[in-house]
């Protein structure tokens, strides 16, 4: 079964939701993916790319050149707005990795493979790290983020930075997903008037249209899962602490994580294996594997046999989404899963205060990031960021404001009882009394649900319209989620 005919997953996971009926969607996909006639790598997975590199049919430099040409061509033809910049050092890095290959040194499955990363992940090179904001232009990080270091060590080529919802969608209460002052509006490639969702908008689009072999996004609540779903790709939000956050522009340390955004589950496994690992600069990773894990060993075609899966029936699902969901459930049964249908997480309606929790952590975490990772920046704290946006309102706030920044500036420190009590209550409701309780009661291996609704039209005047989603439980708990 082809990825674009059906995308499904478990572990608080789901079927990916297309923006059009299947036949029309495939026609549009073909149009976009074949935009450049000379390009022959659309939909090619990491393993096949590696086989081509091993056989000598292609070099890493050629891959860089072809992907770079594809990015430019797609943006010229369709104004996707998905890539902010291409790494000027990528050809040289590719040459070095090609030389290593000729000398018999291959670092692993990602050796010589071009990867795009979200523009809130620090790189100590000639590229910017801005979270889409003009405030951080020129503020060069002193070193690579841990994730980038791991990817480079694995032989991946950091091809460039993807556009995103500015500040990872944590600036305004009525923001437009996929828009940043630096990069403008990212567009959904399957219906250009539709929104790609956010905040990892550019990474989802890049994976969908084969602008890279695979992409990296980040999530606090839904920022990998939602854009992956509406752009028809695989998105993995790992357990918080499996992947280091060092050098990633933060929202909230209790929920932030980076994760793979790819065209196949196999590619996601390869990318996650390279990204995961313990980092002395991120205490949350203390339990992460010291050595690289091989997640590809879990790619078992018979792996669903005997699995007990709890079926969540969220109220937000649209009719077309429900059709796809029922198809996914039938397929899971055919593959040997035992479905417990329905199950309910009784605490799901009691999660008031999730945004307030993020306000507390953002205020503390962003100022720590600015001090350590943006030493040359003129903005040193949250008050400076607010003032910058006011000065640059014509460029930074033409469509929406900075209400969340202003609310965060007014909260107290992380030592305040209001914060600690809120954190503890939300953890209890999402973990012990939430996901853990329903998993234990029904002896489940995973929960499944639709990820989100259909892609909505982009509205720069009204802002994002709600389409529903089921990311909050796993996000607040810090648990894994795949779409």
Image (cartoon, rainbow, N blue to C red):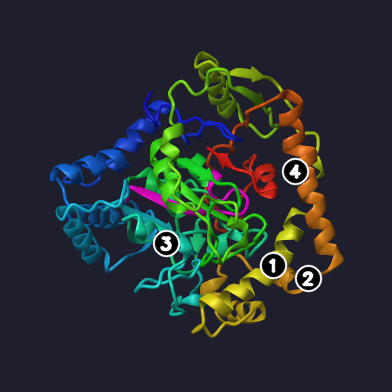
Q: Is residue 218 magenta?
A: yes
Q: Which mark is residue 148?
A: 3
- The residue positioned 38% from the left and 26% from the top of the image is 23
Tag 1 and tag 4, C-beta contact below 8 Å: no
Q: Earlier in the sequence, mark 2 or mark 3?
A: 3
Q: Earlier in the sequence, mark 1 or mark 4?
A: 1
Residue of label 4: 430
Q: Earlier in the sequence, mark 2 or mark 4?
A: 2
Tell me the SS state at disc 2: loop
Which label lies toward us, 2 or 1? Answer: 2
- The residue positioned 62% from the left and 71% from the top of the image is 366
Tell me how far mark 2 sits from mark 4, CA to CA. Answer: 23 Å
Tell me how far mark 1 sits from mark 3, CA to CA. Answer: 31 Å
Residue of label 2: 411
- Using the image as rendered, state which of residue 153 and residue 349 is in the foreground: 153
Relative to 293, 333 lies left or right: right
- The residue positioned 42% from the left and 61% from the top of the image is 148
Q: Residues within 10 Å of mark 4 (few under 14, many from 20)?
A: many
Q: Which mark is residue 403?
A: 1
- The residue positioned 46% from the left and 75% from the top of the image is 141
The span picked out in magenta is: 212-225
Work out whether 41 lies above or below 353: above
Tell me the SS state at disc 3: helix
Work out whether 37 lies above or below 399: above
Q: Residues within 10 Å of mark 3 (few under 14, many from 20)?
A: many
Question: Is residue 414 visible from the viewing direction of this image?
Answer: yes
Give percent across and percent down for residue 469.
Answer: 63, 40
């Amino acid at each position: 079964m082809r990825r674009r005919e059906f995308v499904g997953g478990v572990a608080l996971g789901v079927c990916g939701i297309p923006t059009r009926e299947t036949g029309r969607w495939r026609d549009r996909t073909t149009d976009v993916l074949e935009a450049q006639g000379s390009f022959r790598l659309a939909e090619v997975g990491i393993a096949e790319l590696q086989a081509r590199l091993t056989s000598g049919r292609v070099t890493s430099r050629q891959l860089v050149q072809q992907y770079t040409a594809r990015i430019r061509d797609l943006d010229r033809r369709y104004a996707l707005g998905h890539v902010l910049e291409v790494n000027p050092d990528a050809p040289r890095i590719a040459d070095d990795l090609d030389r290593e290959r000729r000398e018999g040194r291959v670092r692993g499955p990602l050796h010589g493979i071009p990867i795009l990363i979200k523009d809130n992940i620090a790189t100590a090179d000639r590229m910017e790290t801005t979270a889409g904001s003009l405030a951080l232009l020129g503020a060069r990080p002193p070193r690579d983020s841990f994730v980038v270091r791991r990817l480079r060590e694995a032989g991946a080529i950091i091809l460039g930075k993807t556009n995103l919802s500015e500040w990872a969608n944590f600036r305004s209460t009525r923001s437009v997903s996929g828009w940043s002052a630096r990069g403008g509006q990212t567009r959904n490639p399957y219906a250009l008037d539709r929104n790609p969702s956010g905040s990892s908008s550019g990474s989802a689009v890049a994976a969908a249209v084969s602008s890279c072999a695979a992409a990296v996004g980040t999530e606090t609540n839904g920022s990998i899962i939602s854009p992956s779903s509406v752009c028809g790709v695989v998105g993995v939000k790992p357990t918080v602490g499996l992947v280091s956050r060092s050098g990633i522009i933060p929202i909230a340390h209790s929920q932030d994580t980076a994760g793979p955004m790819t065209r196949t589950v196999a590619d996601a496994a390869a990318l996650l294996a390279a990204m995961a690992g313990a980092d002395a600069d991120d205490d949350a990773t203390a339990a992460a594997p010291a050595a690289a894990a091989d997640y590809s060993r879990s790619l078992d075609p018979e792996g669903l046999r005997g699995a007990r899966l709890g079926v969540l029936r969220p109220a937000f699902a649209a009719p077309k989404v429900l059709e796809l969901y029922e198809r996914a459930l039938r397929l899971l049964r055919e593959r040997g899963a035992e479905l417990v249908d329905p199950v309910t997480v009784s605490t799901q309606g009691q999660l008031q205060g999730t945004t307030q929790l993020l306000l507390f952590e953002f205020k503390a975490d962003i100022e720590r990031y600015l001090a350590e990772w943006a030493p040359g920046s003129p903005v040193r704290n949250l008050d400076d960021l607010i003032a910058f946006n006011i000065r640059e309102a014509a460029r930074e706030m033409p469509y929406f404001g900075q209400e969340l920044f202003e609310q965060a500036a007014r909260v107290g420190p992380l030592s305040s009882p209001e914060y600690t009590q809120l954190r503890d209550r939300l953890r209890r409701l999402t973990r012990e009394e939430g996901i853990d309780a329903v998993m234990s009661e029904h002896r489940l291996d995973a929960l499944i649900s639709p990820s989100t609704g259909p892609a909505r039209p982009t509205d720069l005047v009204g802002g994002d319209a709600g389409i529903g989603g089921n990311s909050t439980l796993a996000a607040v708990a810090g648990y894994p989620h795949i779409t």
